[in-house]
Image (cartoon, grey):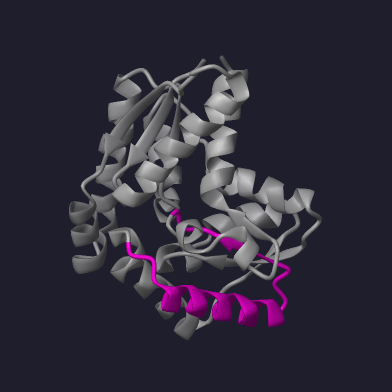
Amino acid sequence: MKKIGLIGGLSWVSTAEYYKRLNVIMQSRLGGVTSARIAMESVNRQDYVDAVIDRGDEASACDQLLDAVRGVERAGADFVVISCNDVHRFVPQIAPQISIPFLHIAEPTAQAIKSQGLKSVSLLGVRKTMEGDFYPKIFEEHGISTVIPNDNERAYIHDKIYQELVKDVFAEATRDGYLSVISQLGARGAEGVVLACTEIPLLLSADQIPAPSFSTTELHCQAAVEQAIHDG
């Protein structure tokens, strides 16, 4: 079995969910009391937020991620899994500086969407995810178009993540608000919805969403386990 290099801390809530799902999936695949081999580095979210939000210093934020990735590389990880969507924007900068590959979160997500025959999906996450190009680019390679929430919708989705979800707060009113946004995006052509923030699937379950939904957390963890097993 290969060792998974898990980058966490952004937030601790998402990291805990990743650790749990990686081990639950691994045990279900291999049986017994099998657990995943994981080397983890946990970034201080406050330092990251200070850089990205307060100072607008993307270079500093990238350096924090690079330091963490090098940590799991030194610990013997065979590939890297980042338990946060938006920091995948740094992968093109970090990948050439390390010797182990990334398992990019958008790739298994695109494959899952394609397997259901969908051609258009909406994208929910923090602003850096919704306004970035790393999901739309990979989706486009698979023939999938991306419906991005409008500015008011993006502000609502982003603010609730920062004010509530990353603090382990999951309110009924926020759940209703997200479902309203998803409905509006469906009316604008989205056939499904990508829950592209690790905490969103903790707020919304698939059976509450009136459209095909894709938890990037679950898909990423499933792909990580498969890579660890098959390459091992």
Front residue of 23 and 101: 23
* Relative height, residue 31 to residue 200 (above, below): above
190 left or right, relative to 79? right
Q: Quadrant of the C terminus?
A: top right
Q: Residue 134: within the magenta?
A: no
Q: Residue at x 39, y 71 (%)?
A: 171
80 left or right, relative to 31? left
Residue 10 visible? The answer is: no
Q: Where does the image place residue 21, in percent across and percent down from the top left?
A: 48, 38
Front residue of 84 and 61: 84
Q: Residue at x 40, y 29 (%)?
A: 5
Q: Where does the image place residue 13, in percent across and percent down from the top left?
A: 34, 50
Extent of the magenta region = 169-198
Residue 128 visible? The answer is: yes
111 left or right, relative to 199? right
* Relative height, residue 67 to residue 135 (above, below): above
Q: Residue at x 57, y 57 (%)?
A: 135
Q: Residue furthest right?
A: 117
Q: Residue 196: within the magenta?
A: yes
150 left or right, relative to 109? left
Q: Residue furthest bottom?
A: 152
Q: Residue at x 72, y 77 (%)?
A: 189
Q: Where does the image place residue 98, in percent across and percent down from the top left?
A: 38, 29
